[in-house]
Amino acid sequence: MLARTNGGSMYAHRPGGISLLYAVSAVLCVVGALVPMSPGTPVPLLWALAGVGAAGAAVLWLRRDRLGPPALHVAIALASAALGVLTWRSATAVGIVGLGPAMVAVGVFSAHFLSRRAARVHVAVLLTVTTAGAVAAAPSGFLLAWATAVVTVVVLTEAQARITGELRQAAGTDPLTGLANRRTWEAEANRSLAHALRTGEPLTVAVLDLDDFKRINDEQGHGAGDALLRTLAGRWSTELRLADSLGRYGGDEFVLCLPGTDAQRAAELLSRLRAGHPAAWSAGTATVRPEDSLSELLVRADADLYRDKRDKRRDT
């Protein structure tokens, strides 16, 4: 019944994304070194940062499928530190203020690929080190322009964070029921499964499938079927803990991930869910075993669901 896909890491493409930021930075440093803005331009520093940027871009790109969230945070922090050094060593006020677009790029990148809280932390670090560098720099007379650049970074980062948050919400939510869609549910279930395998805590996955849902759509209309799905999603959600994850897997199929729950407690929960609404549905469960994958759990839960449906047909 269920199509099998494994939840992929949401971070898989992010180191590859920041590798482009590093590559562009390296090119700009090369241009700055070849065409200095003034006699005091720190050309050796620009060449050094160009080398670091090129090497960083290469590493981040070549290892993009192996690097996780920590690598992304380190890469952003290093970019902020490099900007701080550049502001400190800038020879002119124009050179200092001219780093504003690079600061905006780091802020917008953080807001797009990280959570809003993490992006705010990175932007706070960025603005702290660059402002400290600007204050310590030799040039003066750029206070108003620098304040404008700082405000611009903050505003654009917040705007990007809001837009990205709305897009993530839309992309990760089933529009009919408001539950997690399959991709989001699998990502959350994989995180819970990894924790269960690491700690030895129980975890149970359940597959729920409505009985005769096609008949409801045929006899009462698709509006009635949609209303039933929304009602069940709302009723079931009220019985779950914050740690539990309920998702719509497609059609009239739902999935539950129950961390810290063994087979007996999962059966008790399903009984409470059945008591909450008279609609008929079948369920299958699977409790984690050592070395299990989410796909294997779903296969066993699906097989248990088929047994439940066969037993119902035999009894009628």
Image (spheres, rainbow, N blue to C red):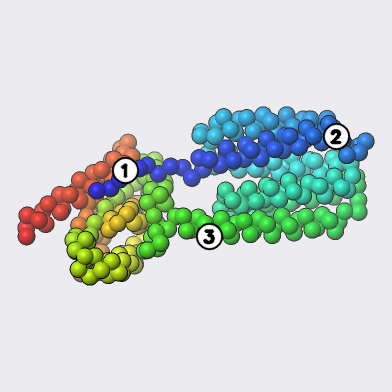
CA distance for labels 1 and 2:
56 Å
Question: Residue 77 placed where, x, y %?
Answer: 66, 43
Judged left or right of residue 211, residue 162 is right
The residue under label 1 is: 4
The image's mark for residue 35 is: 2
Camera-near label (3 vs 2) is 2
CA distance for labels 3 and 1:
28 Å
Q: Residue at coordinates 70% horizontally, 33% vertically from top-left?
A: 53
Task: Report how many numbered discs are placed on residues in the image.
Answer: 3
The residue under label 3 is: 166
Q: Residue at coordinates 28% horizontally, 66% vertically from top-left?
A: 222
Question: Residue 297 placed where, x, y %?
Answer: 28, 43
The image's mark for residue 110 is: none
The disc labelled 2 sits on which kind of residue?
A: Val
Secondary structure beneath dot 1 equals: loop
Around disc 2, counting alpha carbons within 10 Å, would you say few (fewer than 14), some (14 to 19), or many (20 or more)? few
Around disc 1, counting alpha carbons within 10 Å, would you say few (fewer than 14), some (14 to 19), or many (20 or more)? few
CA distance for labels 3 and 2:
42 Å
Report the front residue among 18 and 133: 18
The disc labelled 3 sits on which kind of residue?
A: Glu
